[in-house]
Amino acid sequence: MDIKQTWEKVIEYATMPLHGSLSRKQRKGVKIRINEGAILEGATFFLEELVLWVSETSDGQVSNSYYDWTKISSIKTISNDEK
Protein backbone atom coordinates (compact mmCIF):
# COMPACT_ATOMS: atom_id res chain seq x y z
CA MET A 1 0.00 0.00 0.00
CA ASP A 2 1.47 3.39 -0.95
CA ILE A 3 1.14 6.56 1.14
CA LYS A 4 -1.76 7.90 -0.98
CA GLN A 5 -3.78 4.75 -0.32
CA THR A 6 -3.04 5.00 3.40
CA TRP A 7 -4.24 8.62 3.60
CA GLU A 8 -7.29 7.78 1.47
CA LYS A 9 -8.29 5.11 4.02
CA VAL A 10 -8.00 7.62 6.87
CA ILE A 11 -10.15 10.17 4.99
CA GLU A 12 -12.69 7.47 4.06
CA TYR A 13 -13.02 6.53 7.75
CA ALA A 14 -13.80 10.12 8.77
CA THR A 15 -16.13 10.93 5.86
CA MET A 16 -19.10 9.55 3.96
CA PRO A 17 -19.84 9.61 0.23
CA LEU A 18 -22.15 12.33 -1.06
CA HIS A 19 -24.92 10.79 -3.14
CA GLY A 20 -24.44 11.22 -6.90
CA SER A 21 -20.95 12.63 -6.44
CA LEU A 22 -17.34 11.51 -6.15
CA SER A 23 -16.86 13.81 -3.16
CA ARG A 24 -17.02 12.90 0.52
CA LYS A 25 -18.49 14.91 3.42
CA GLN A 26 -17.13 14.81 6.95
CA ARG A 27 -19.12 12.61 9.30
CA LYS A 28 -21.12 14.49 11.91
CA GLY A 29 -19.07 14.86 15.08
CA VAL A 30 -15.75 13.98 13.41
CA LYS A 31 -13.11 16.68 13.03
CA ILE A 32 -10.02 16.35 10.83
CA ARG A 33 -6.64 18.04 11.08
CA ILE A 34 -4.11 17.74 8.23
CA ASN A 35 -0.39 18.43 8.84
CA GLU A 36 -1.08 20.19 12.16
CA GLY A 37 -3.12 22.82 10.29
CA ALA A 38 -6.59 24.12 11.08
CA ILE A 39 -9.16 21.71 12.47
CA LEU A 40 -11.76 21.01 9.79
CA GLU A 41 -15.48 20.53 10.48
CA GLY A 42 -18.13 20.00 7.83
CA ALA A 43 -15.65 20.09 4.93
CA THR A 44 -16.05 18.30 1.63
CA PHE A 45 -13.17 16.15 0.39
CA PHE A 46 -12.29 15.22 -3.18
CA LEU A 47 -9.81 12.34 -3.40
CA GLU A 48 -8.07 13.27 -6.65
CA GLU A 49 -5.21 11.32 -8.23
CA LEU A 50 -2.46 13.83 -7.42
CA VAL A 51 -4.02 15.98 -4.69
CA LEU A 52 -6.46 15.92 -1.81
CA TRP A 53 -8.88 18.80 -2.43
CA VAL A 54 -10.70 20.16 0.64
CA SER A 55 -13.59 22.59 0.26
CA GLU A 56 -15.13 24.53 3.13
CA THR A 57 -17.93 27.10 3.26
CA SER A 58 -17.98 29.74 5.98
CA ASP A 59 -19.90 33.02 6.16
CA GLY A 60 -20.98 32.63 2.53
CA GLN A 61 -17.44 32.17 1.24
CA VAL A 62 -15.97 28.98 -0.22
CA SER A 63 -12.38 28.13 0.64
CA ASN A 64 -10.52 25.42 -1.29
CA SER A 65 -7.25 23.87 -0.11
CA TYR A 66 -5.15 21.41 -2.08
CA TYR A 67 -2.71 18.95 -0.51
CA ASP A 68 -0.09 16.97 -2.39
CA TRP A 69 -0.58 13.37 -1.20
CA THR A 70 3.18 12.93 -0.82
CA LYS A 71 3.49 16.07 1.33
CA ILE A 72 0.90 15.01 3.91
CA SER A 73 2.80 14.01 7.04
CA SER A 74 -0.13 13.50 9.41
CA ILE A 75 -3.90 13.34 9.54
CA LYS A 76 -5.60 13.51 12.91
CA THR A 77 -9.26 12.60 13.48
CA ILE A 78 -11.07 13.92 16.56
CA SER A 79 -14.44 12.66 17.80
CA ASN A 80 -16.37 12.25 21.03
CA ASP A 81 -15.80 9.18 23.16
CA GLU A 82 -18.82 6.91 22.68
CA LYS A 83 -19.00 5.00 25.98
Image (cartoon, grey):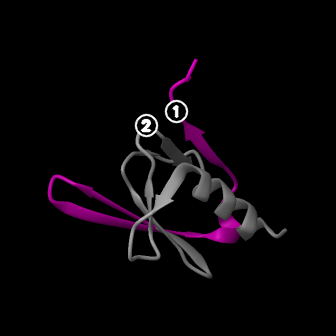
Measuring 55% from the left and 23% from the top, which residue is drawn there?
82
- Mark 2 lies on a secondary structure that is loop
Q: Which amino acid does label 1 sit on?
A: Ser
Name the residue beneath numbered marker 2. Answer: 29
Given residues 28 and 75, the one toward you in this image is: 28
Considering only vertical position in the picture, is 23 above or below 43? Answer: below
Q: From mark 1 to mark 2, how far is it between C-alphas?
A: 6 Å
Considering only vertical position in the picture, is 80 above or below 7? Answer: above
Residue 42 placement (x, y as % from top left): 36, 50
Q: Which residues are the magenta region? A: 54-83
Considering only vertical position in the picture, is 43 above or below 36? Answer: below
Q: Which residue lies furthest to the bottom in this view?
A: 49
Measuring 16% from the left and 52% from the top, which residue is drawn there?
59
Measuring 51% from the left and 46% from the top, which residue is drawn there?
32
Measuring 58% from the left and 41% from the top, which residue is drawn there?
77
The mark tally for this picture is 2
Q: Earlier in the sequence, mark 1 or mark 2?
A: 2
Residue 72 placement (x, y as % from top left): 66, 60
| Residues at marks 1 and 2 touching, judged by CB atoms closer than 8 Å | yes
Image quadrant in which the C terminus is located:
top right
Residue 41 placement (x, y as % from top left): 39, 45
Q: Which amino acid does label 2 sit on?
A: Gly
Residue 2 placement (x, y as % from top left): 82, 70
Given residues 60 and 47, the one toward you in this image is: 47
Q: Quadrant of residue 76?
A: top right
Callout 1 crowding tier (Cα within 10 Å): few <14, some 14–19, many ≥20: few
Name the residue beneath numbered marker 1. Answer: 79
- Mark 1 lies on a secondary structure that is loop
Considering only vertical position in the picture, is 16 above or below 51? Answer: above
In the image, 69: left or right of 15?
right
Q: Which residue lies furthest to the front in this view?
A: 19
Query: Is 43 one of the magenta-colored residues?
Result: no
